Amino acid sequence: MRTLCASTLISEFLVIGFAGLVAMKDPDLAVGTVWTVCGIAMFLSVALCGMITRPGGVALGWALQIILIASGVVVPMMFILGVLFAVLWWASVHYGRKIDEAKARFAAQQPA
């Protein structure tokens, strides 16, 4: 699960950075504010890569997905990208757990 989730989170890191570049063009937003918010979200996406297997790691990942969808208020394309990444996050968690279970079964079948 860790590899799939980390891949999704690193991709989100890049998308958040590009969304920050788009948001900078909005004259109503201060550049410092845009990069503070984007920086925190980018840091969270990288930090979550190491926290996936810990209690609450997946829940924090879901919180990041909600934040990405909500960022569509500022950058409308993020509504679409946020939903897309939420689906990717679900798939990463769901199939990652299935892969982990299959690996554990395979390891248990191997002679010592």
Image (cartoon, rainbow, N blue to C red):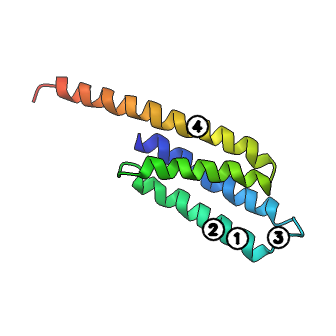
Identify the residue shown where x is 38% and y is 30%.
99
Residue named by callout 1: 35
Mark 3 residue type = Leu
Residue named by callout 4: 88
**Vertical arrangement, residue 102 with respect to residue 60, above or below:** above
Give how far apart the Cα atoms at labels 3 and 1 are.
Answer: 10 Å
Question: Which comes before the other along the chain, label 3 or label 1?
Answer: 3
Element carrying mark 2: helix
Question: Which comes before the other along the chain, label 4 or label 2?
Answer: 2
Question: Which comes before the other along the chain, label 4 or label 3?
Answer: 3
Residue named by callout 3: 29
Instruction: Evaluate if marks 1 and 2 touch, with contact meaning CB atoms under 8 Å apart.
Output: yes
Within the image, what quadrant is residue 100 found in? top left
Residue occupying the far left of the picture: 112
What is the crowding at mark 3: few (fewer than 14 residues within 10 Å), some, or many (at least 20)? few
Disc assigned to residue 39: 2
Mark 1 residue type = Trp
Report whether residue 33 is seen. yes
Give how far apart the Cα atoms at labels 3 and 2 are.
Answer: 15 Å
Identify the residue shown where x is 25% and y is 25%.
106
Element carrying mark 1: helix
Instruction: Evaluate if marks 3 and 2 touch, with contact meaning CB atoms under 8 Å apart.
Output: no
Between 19 and 79, the one nearer to me in the picture: 79
Element carrying mark 4: helix
